[in-house]
Amino acid sequence: MFKNTFLIILAAVLVSGCATETRYVDPAADDGPVSMSLDYRDFDRAATEAVEDMLASGVVDNPNGGRYIMVVSRITNDTMQRVDTDRLVKKIRVALLRSGKVVTTTAVGLNGAEDEMSMRARELRDSEEFDQSGVQRKGTLQAPDLSLSGKLMQKNHQLGGEQRVEYSIQLTLTDLATGLAFWEGETPIIKQGSGKSVSW
């Protein structure tokens, strides 16, 4: 009995001693190990490059003044990973909003409104339960000028005992009035490491 208790305590001490301590990571100074899969650092880089290039090109400078209205179209994930493309898109949206040149509409989208409340709030018209002076009027929603679409791609290469994974984040900004691509950008992300590493 004593021997079993001692072994249990010893095992618990050894396991707790080997456990990795949880800690915060500063994204601005993250020099941790690089994985073969896409991570937040890759999305940060791609979003930063895309927005800086858009701003430098002048494509989001509205000649009529004011800000362009952008809608997010389809961002296709053609990699081997389950990637939430919203992580990339959100960073782009935030940066463009902060630039003062672009706002994003959440009232329309390929799969319906991102925020359904824009239309739900308008269903309150003529309801006797609501003060109509505060209900949104007809003709106040703003149609988008620009559409952001894109694709995430991946290609793996075996190099002896190592592997190289080539990612490509491709983005297009389309003028909805003409259907013309006003801006296109591509961020290559290439990683090389052990052939035993998993990239999905």
Image (tube, rainbow, N blue to C red):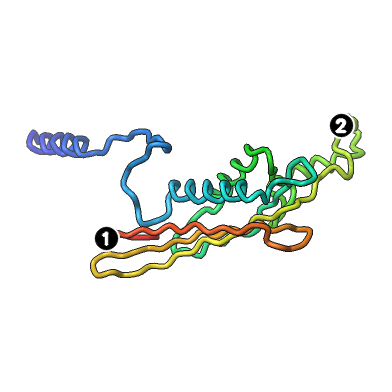
Q: Residue at x 73, y 42 (%)?
A: 67
Judge whether 112 appears above or below 11 on screen.
below
| Above or below, 77 relative to 94 | below
Q: Quadrant of the C terminus?
A: bottom left
Horizontal relation, residue 36 to residue 64: left or right:
left
Residue at the spot of label 2: 130
Q: Which mark is residue 194?
A: 1
In this view of the protein, which residue sits in the foreground, 112 or 163? 163
Q: Secondary structure at mark 1?
A: strand
Question: Looking at the image, is mark 1 or mark 2 earlier in the sequence?
Answer: 2
Q: Nearer the viewer, mark 1 or mark 2?
A: 1
Is disc 2 placed on a helix, strand or loop? loop
Quarter of the view holding residue 15: top left
Whether residues under marks 1 and 2 lie with C-beta atoms below 8 angstroms apart, the answer is no
Q: Quadrant of residue 75?
A: bottom right
User: Which quadrant would the N terminus be assigned to in this image?
Assistant: top left
Give the Cα distance between marks 1 and 2: 64 Å
Residue depicted at x 26% and y 38%: 20
Residue type, numbered disc 1: Ser
Q: Position of residue 150 (x, y in %)?
A: 59, 60
Q: Is residue 107 left or right of residue 1?
A: right
Q: Is residue 144 left or right of residue 59?
A: right
Identify which residue is drawn at 55% across, 62% down: 151
Is 116 in front, or is 4?
Answer: 116
Q: Residues within 10 Å of mark 2 (few under 14, many from 20)?
A: few
The residue depicted at 37 percent of the width and 33 percent of the height is 24
Q: Position of residue 31 (x, y in %)?
A: 34, 41
Residue reaching furthest left?
A: 3
Say above or below: 51 vs 73.
above
- The kind of residue on which mark 2 rests is Phe
Spot occupied by residue 152 in the image (x, y as percentages of width and height) = 51, 61
